[in-house]
Amino acid sequence: MTAFALYRLPHQQEVTLVEQTTGNPTEITSLQELNGRQGFVVAPFQTSAECPVLLIRPDRVQTFRNYALGIVPLLSENGAAFLPVKCHFTARKAPLPSCERADYASDFARFHQQLREGRFRKIVLSRCAEQLFDDDADPLQLFGRACEYYPRLFISLVYTPQSGYWLTATPEVLLEGQNGRWHTMALAGTMTLEGDDLNGEGERVQWSDKNIQEQRYVASYIMDCLTHLATDIREEGPRTVRAANLVHLRSDFTFNLLDDACVGNLISQLHPTPAVCGLPKAETYRFIQEHEHTPRRYYSGFMGPLHLQSATHLYVTLRCMQIAEGKYRLYAGGGLLKDSVEEQEWQETEAKLETMRQCIATKKM
C-alpha cells in the first residue's frame, strides 16, 4: 500500500487526503532540510534510523467536503485511489504485562529527583499504554470517530512503510502559516473537566501556580526562539482552551519570518518545545532519551501539511496511538515541576489517554 496522510483541521468539516503513489516517503536527517520542501511531514520526538523524519510527497491531493458523511463512502464516492480497508494483524492472545504503573512510578522518582536537586526547572514524563484488539483494526473508522468526537482538535491518520499507522487528535500547533503570516502557540498546564463544566469551555477553571508556571516556561522559550528568526511578533494570552474533556493554558504568537523559505530553521529551533521536553532543553531532552521506559517514537513529534495548497499546518503529535501488531499503543505525558505529586501526574496521563481510548472503545452500529 502506498503512503498517505488523511487530516482534518480544527473546527472544519473538510477532510484532505495526501497520497504518495510511488516509492517510499523521503527520509530527512535534519529539520533544516525542510527548507523549500512541500508535502506531509511526519516527525518523531527523536530522529533515529528506526524513526526518521518522513516527508510524504504530494503526488495526489484531494479535499472532501464533509467527514460527517462517513469516511469510507466519502472517499469511494469521490473516486479516491486510496482506500485501505482493515489492518490484517495477527492479534496477540496472551495478556500484556501489567507493569505500566510500576514503570511510571520508577520513572517519576528518577525524573523528580532531578527537579528536587535543581538540575531541571521542568521535565516532561511520558508513558505508553497497550491495548489488544481481537478483530482487525479499521483505521478509517477510527479516524471518522476522532473527527466526530473532537471537533476542536487536529485529526490525522498517517500510514508509511517506515512508520506504520498512527492516529492523532491534538490541540497544539507547532507552526502554521498562510500568506506570509505565521502562528505558533505555548500550550501547557492541564485540568480535567467534570460535571457541569463539560457544558462549557472551561471558563470557571481555577489554575494552580504549578500549571501557570509550567505554561510560562513554554511561552518564554518560544518568544526567545522567535526573537532571532522573526519580526512583528505579537503574543496574546494566556487563556483557557478546551481539548476534549481537558483544558489547557494557551498563549498565541503571530509573526513574520525573516525568510519564509527558511521555515525549516524555525522548526528545528521550536522542536521539541518545553511543552513536550523540558528546561533546560538540551539537558532534559538527553535525560528523557536515556531514562524513559518506553521510546516515544512519533509521539511528541509533529506532523501536518507543509506548504500544501498555499498553507502550512504542523501540529505537535500529542493524543495519539500507533496501530501495531495486534495491539494499539497509546501515548500520553505531562510536565513535572519540583512540587509535582506522582499520583496526580499519573491521573493526568490517564485523562489524556481517554482521548484515544474513546475512539477504540465505541462501536458504531
Image (cartoon, rainbow, N blue to C red):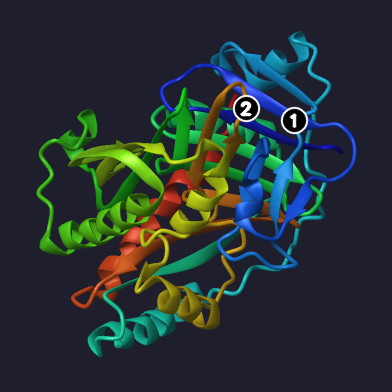
Task: Choose top left, top right, bottom left or bottom right for residue 1.
Answer: top right
Which residue is situated farthest in the bottom direction here? 117
Quick one: label 1, few (<14), some, or many (20+) residues within 10 Å? Answer: many
Q: Nearer the N terminus, badge 2 or badge 1?
A: 1
Residue at 29% x, 58% y is 218
Left or right: residue 227 versus residue 10 is left
Q: Position of residue 337 (x, y in %)?
A: 25, 72
Residue at 81% x, 49% y is 161
Left or right: residue 149 versus residue 2 is left
- Disc 2 secondary structure class: loop
Residue at 47% x, 60% y is 272
Q: Position of residue 261 (x, y in %)?
A: 57, 39
Residue at 60% x, 74% y is 97
- Residue 345 shows in the view: yes
133 is higher (above) or lower (below) than 199:
below
- Disc 1 secondary structure class: loop
Q: Which residue is mark 1?
A: 58
CB within 8 Å, label 2 to label 1: yes
Q: Position of residue 314 (x, y in %)?
A: 52, 40
337 is higher (above) or lower (below) than 40:
below
Quick one: label 2, few (<14), some, or many (20+) residues within 10 Å? Answer: some
Q: Amino acid at mark 1?
A: Pro
Q: Which residue is mark 2?
A: 308
| Nearer the observer, 335 or 199 | 335
| Nearer the observer, 108 or 217 | 217
Left or right: residue 341 versus residue 269 is left
